[in-house]
Amino acid sequence: MNTNYLYSDLTGQIIKAYYNVYNTLGFGFLEKVYENAMMIELRKMGIEADQQKLLKVYYDEEEVGHYFADILVENKVVVELKAAESLSPDHEAQLVNYLRATDLEVGLLLNFGKKVEHLRRVLTKDYKPPRRNPNRS
């Protein structure tokens, strides 16, 4: 397995769980069905995960909103699930924005559409805008 990126072993296990669920259920269900199945699969693999995890978004050190991550794995990887015909740039932008708005650096976008589609994004702190005003004392 390629270990040149952050949490490569963990994301590899998540993708394995995705394939197990996809191969068992196929496509055509609502996203929530796949989310529940992913939680079962991750639990069977001994991987800690939270479903619909509340994550807060900050601007200039103030909370400006929140979102619910479909699945947050080991407090390290945001997993955004889709049940769409195919992934779109908007889906990817949603994942990138989730990463930019939090202290998390790794995200997976997994689609349970007609064909297997997944996307891994690593957004290191070096590439993120600061979450607070650096001129503020």
Image: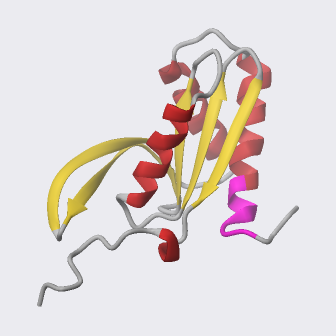
Left or right of 132 on screen, residue 74: right
> Which residue is situated farthest in the top direction here?
28
> Which residue is situated farthest in the front direction here?
135
Number of labels in the image equals 0
Name above or below for residue 28 compared with residue 68. above
Quadrant containing the C terminus is: bottom left
Expressed as whole percent of the image width and height from the top left, the position of residue 39 reads 56, 38
Q: Is residue 104 magenta?
A: no
The one nearer the camera, 46 or 20, is 20
Taking the image as drawn, is residue 44 in sight? no
Name above or below for residue 69 compared with residue 121. above
Name above or below for residue 23 compared with residue 104. above
Expressed as whole percent of the image width and height from the top left, the position of residue 60 reads 17, 69
Quadrant containing the N terminus is: bottom right
Taking the image as drawn, is residue 112 in sight? yes
Q: What residue is drawn where x is 62% and y is 28%?
A: 87
Expressed as whole percent of the image width and height from the top left, the position of residue 120 reads 66, 50
The span picked out in magenta is 5-11
Q: Is residue 9 magenta?
A: yes
Left or right of 102 on screen, residue 46: right
Q: What residue is drawn where x is 54% and y is 20%?
A: 33
The one nearer the camera, 18 or 134, is 134
